[in-house]
Image (tube, rainbow, N blue to C red):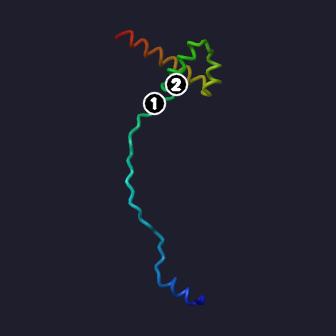
């Protein structure tokens, strides 16, 4: 086969520039739980072990603000449990 024959074959076939792929995607609604709520049990445990806030910051690699928010969350949830 020579080059001119290959060019002729290539010209006879359409060039596909766009493809359609049928896809079904399931989008779930995950209730994103804030980090301070996720880490609250672990922070409670570390506090019971006697760790300071700075030690928790280093160990969990989170900000001090996240730990403070977690403490407030734990306090509020404990107060709500006591009211019931």
- Is the residue 14 above or below the residue 63 in the image? below
Residue at 36% over, 9% down: 83
Residue at 61% over, 12% down: 50
Residue at 46% over, 79% down: 14
Residue 22 in picture, x, y percent from top left = 38, 60
Where residue 68 sits, quadrant-wise, is top right
Residue 26 in picture, x, y percent from top left = 38, 47
Say what secondary structure mark 1 lies in: loop
Where residue 78 sits, quadrant-wise, is top left
Pointer 1 local density, CA inside 10 Å: few below 14, some 14–19, many at least 20: few
Pointer 2 local density, CA inside 10 Å: few below 14, some 14–19, many at least 20: some
- Is the residue 21 above or below the residue 25 in the image? below
Where residue 64 sits, quadrant-wise, is top right
Question: Could you tell which of marks 1 and 2 lies nearer the N-terminus?
Answer: 1
C-alpha span from label 1 to label 2: 10 Å
Q: Please tell me whether mark 1 or mark 2 is closer to you in this view.
A: 2
Q: Quadrant of the C terminus?
A: top left
Q: In the rendered image, which residue does mark 2 sit on?
A: 39
Q: Quadrant of the N terminus?
A: bottom right
Between 66 and 46, the residue placed more toward the observer is 46
- Is the residue 21 above or below the residue 39 in the image? below
Residue 32 in picture, x, y percent from top left = 44, 34
Q: In the rendered image, which residue does mark 1 sit on?
A: 33
Residue at 39% over, 14% down: 80
């Amino acid at each position: 086969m020579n080059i001119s024959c290959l060019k002729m074959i290539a010209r006879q076939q359409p060039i596909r520039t766009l493809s359609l792929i049928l896809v079904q995607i399931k989008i779930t609604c995950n209730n994103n739980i804030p980090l301070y709520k996720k880490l609250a049990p672990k922070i409670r445990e570390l506090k019971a072990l006697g760790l300071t806030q700075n030690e928790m910051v280093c160990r969990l690699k989170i900000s001090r603000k996240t730990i403070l928010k977690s403490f407030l969350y734990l306090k509020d949830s404990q107060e709500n449990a006591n009211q019931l």
